[in-house]
Amino acid sequence: MAAGDGPPSIAVKVRYVQNSNNVHRYDLTVPVCFVFTISSNQSLVMQSALVIGPSRNSFRGSTANQIHFVEGIPTEKYPDPLPALLSPHTPYQTPARKLPKRRVLSEPPNKRRKVLFDVTELENSEIVPCSSPSIVDDSVLKANSVSSDTAQDVCPLDLLAIAAENHQLKQQLAQLLLANEESKRKDLDEVESNSTNKKSNIPLSIEILVNSKVKGSFKYYSGFSHERFMNIYNFLVKDETLPFKPSVAVKCIKSMPVKDQLLLTLMKLRQNFDNIHLANLFHISSQDVSVIFSNWINFMFFHFGSVSIWPHRDVIIQNMPSKFKCDFPETMIILDGTEMKIQRPTALTTQSQMYSDYKSATTVKGLIGVDPRGSVTFISMLFSGAISDKAISSQSGLFDTMRKMINCGMLKEGDGVMVDKGFNIREEIEMLGLRLVIPPNAPCEGQMPAADVAMTKKIAAHRVHVERAISRIKKFKILSNRIDLSFFSTLDLIT
């Protein structure tokens, strides 16, 4: 004990356990300074205790580290000292943000509940009969038919019964309205189904496509505009009679209009529809579709094949693009090969002959030539996909055709033939007296000269005409899709 001006004190170590009612709990030994006073009978009385050991951070959330007796001295109720902020008189609270004020929920003005009856107004008012009372008004009048002389109180149970009856009537009305709407919808569906059935009973024809509300329907199905279709029809058919004798006697060929037969053939070429689908559109059998298509393909092949598509060199030069005329003024044809995927044949030898390393599939290959303007001037027959460009050039009859063109003056010696790097036909072209325009090969060592690079770019820029012509041909889906083996007999006629 230390003596001094103030009261005597002694420092001891105690084990302090925080009250279990508080959120934070501490179990540590700290030095505490107890303050005693000497009473009149020379006895020690402990007044308070001061924690002097740990820092204030040891008591999370506290603002002071003093402990004291609640009533000043130890009592039976509080025999031990308590922290100043943990006494029952000042409960411990962790500082925290104030809770937000609770919002008062209120309904929007347009969704507030409607008050069916105001009891106070009903009690203080007289019931006046209406000229055209509704169901609810009658029930209210019957339930509250009291005279002004005998003003009796209205029973709340009667009001509840009226409200329940009103709710039930509203539900019945809603059910009736829904049933009415469903009946109207069924009637509309029946009318639409009848109209569609009537339309479906009409076979597809040129007039339907021409008068269709969908813009571009005729070109979508046939690949040509109506005006160009009529030009093709007038070229093939001199009068309204069938221009050929069918290979198989089919009744629908005689009864079906000739224009619709040509339309069916073009639809098969353009969209590659199944025979069953075309049979449903034109209201004929699938066998009839096959007969019509094969007969018209044969007729169109021989009729169009008799037309010369290679123009005179003067016409080519006259219609040659200015850029092409500046770079290659004497080049009359651009050649390139194209491949089309086919269904894999069952024979292994045929598979090996038709397998293309370029496409990694079984294909057939053809040779196409166009003039500088992009018009097709030469189309070969189809060969197996494994054939080279040089072989297809010699076997397709290209050189014989060029020789005939030179003899008749359509071409002359010195005219150019533009090809890609794969066409190693320089000797054959020079033997005809023509000139081969081909991109230069890269040297084995070193870089390509600047002049060769410029020439390669020029040739590539002008060879795009033949690429576009091939893309236009493959817009006909019978050639762009994988070709079925059933078309092998007419594949050369189609192309």
Image (tube, rainbow, N blue to C red):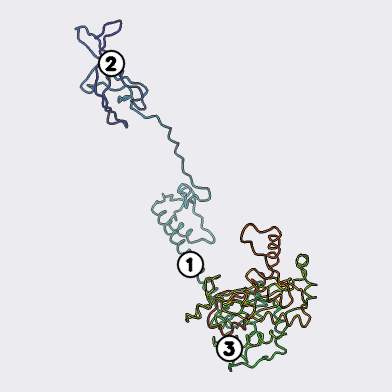
Q: Is residue 70 visible?
A: no
Q: Where residue 18 appears, x then y in whole percent?
A: 28, 27
> Residue 375 vs residue 71: left or right?
right
**C-alpha separation, residue under disc 2 versus residue under disc 1:** 88 Å
The secondary structure type at the circle numbered 3 is: helix
Q: Nearer the viewer, residue 83 or 481?
A: 481
Evaluate if marks 3 and 2 touch, with contact meaning CB atoms under 8 Å apart. Answer: no
Q: Tell me, for residue 291, which label it has, or none.
A: 3
Residue 416 occupies quadrant: bottom right
Relative to residue 401, is residue 287 drawn left or right? left
Assign the C terminus to one quadrant of the image: bottom right
Quarter of the image holding residue 14?
A: top left
Inter-mark Cα distance, 3 to 2:
117 Å
Whether tag 2 and tag 1 are in contact, CB under 8 A, the answer is no
Residue drawn at the location 58% of the way across and 93% of the way down: 248
Residue drawn at the location 24% of the way across and 17% of the way down:
12
Q: Which residue is mark 2?
A: 33
Helix, strand, or loop for circle 2?
Answer: strand
State which quarter of the image contains the N terminus.
top left
**Residue toward you, 170 or 220:** 220
Where residue 287 sits, quadrant-wise, is bottom right
* Residue behind mark 1: 176
Disc 1 element = helix
Q: Earlier in the sequence, mark 3 or mark 1?
A: 1
Q: Residue at x 71, y 69 (%)?
A: 437
Q: Position of residue 95 (x, y in %)?
A: 39, 29
In the rendered structure, which amino acid carries the disc numbered 1?
Leu
> Label 2 is placed on what type of residue?
Cys
Identify the mark nearer the N-term, 3 or 2. 2
Residue at the top extreme, as displayed: 5
**Is 246 placed left or right of 371 in the picture?**
left
